[in-house]
Image: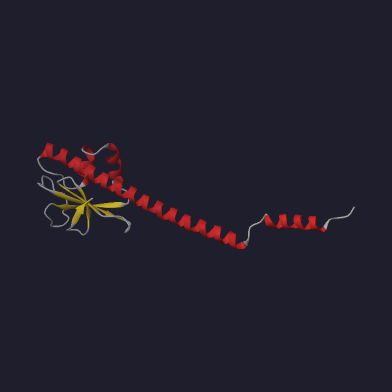
């Protein structure tokens, strides 16, 4: 049996056409790396937004608790402990004991009208309040809530804008 040289050449070419070149593999790997970088950045932004929303929600819960405290006592509470016992939902009260009321943030209570932090004093009449949620991560926004009950973004400790 004689072999046809033209037929052998065609079969060899078919075998060579089945693989990928090195350039094609590098391009695909580069494309996958770019897409995964974009996806990771997007997920990081979504995580930050979720954490920030949690902080804003926590501050709104404080504002609601302050309103209830005002109705009962004729003044606002200064500090978290007076609110956590009675005026905040149980889920928040449990976390408050551990200091985790607002995840990834620390709360700073400031006496209304400035003047800096002041320790809670029994029967101290507080007519206004300011609570800052200061992030533990510098990529997150700082939030503030005052007696008007509106969560705002704090640019500095004296300037803030609507959230």
Residue 51 left/right relative to 123: right
Residue 97: percent from the left, percent from the top?
28, 44
**Position of 30 relative to 112 (above/below):** below
Q: Which residue is drawn at the image coordinates 30% and 50% (left, top)?
A: 52
Instruction: Work out which residue is located at the far right of the displayed protein and give it.
Output: 1
Foreground residue among 137 and 124: 137
The colour scheme used to paint the residues is secondary structure
**Residue 18 occupies quadrant:** bottom right
Residue 71: percent from the left, percent from the top?
12, 37
Q: Which residue is drawn at the image coordinates 66% and 56% (left, top)?
A: 19
Foreground residue among 153 and 96: 153
Residue 117: percent from the left, percent from the top?
17, 55
Foreground residue among 86 and 129: 129
**Residue 75 occupies quadrant:** top left
Disc count in the image?
A: 0
Q: Which residue is drawn at the image coordinates 28% and 41% (left, top)?
A: 92
Residue 50: percent from the left, percent from the top?
34, 47
């Amino acid at each position: 049996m004689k072999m046809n040289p033209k037929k052998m050449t065609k079969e060899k070419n078919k075998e060579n056409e089945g693989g990928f070149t090195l350039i094609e593999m590098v391009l695909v790997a580069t494309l996958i790396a770019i897409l995964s970088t974009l996806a990771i950045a997007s997920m990081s932004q979504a995580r930050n937004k979720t954490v920030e929303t949690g902080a804003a929600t926590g501050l709104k819960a404080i504002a609601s608790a302050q309103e209830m405290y005002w109705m009962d006592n004729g003044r606002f509470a200064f500090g978290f402990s007076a609110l956590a016992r009675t005026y905040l939902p149980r889920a928040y009260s449990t976390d408050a004991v551990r200091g985790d009321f607002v995840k990834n943030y620390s709360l700073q209570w400031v006496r209304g009208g400035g003047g800096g932090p002041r320790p809670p004093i029994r029967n101290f009449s507080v007519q206004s309040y300011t609570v800052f949620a200061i992030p533990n991560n510098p990529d997150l926004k700082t939030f503030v809530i005052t007696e008007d009950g509106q969560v705002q973004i704090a640019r500095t400790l004296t300037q803030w804008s609507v959230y």
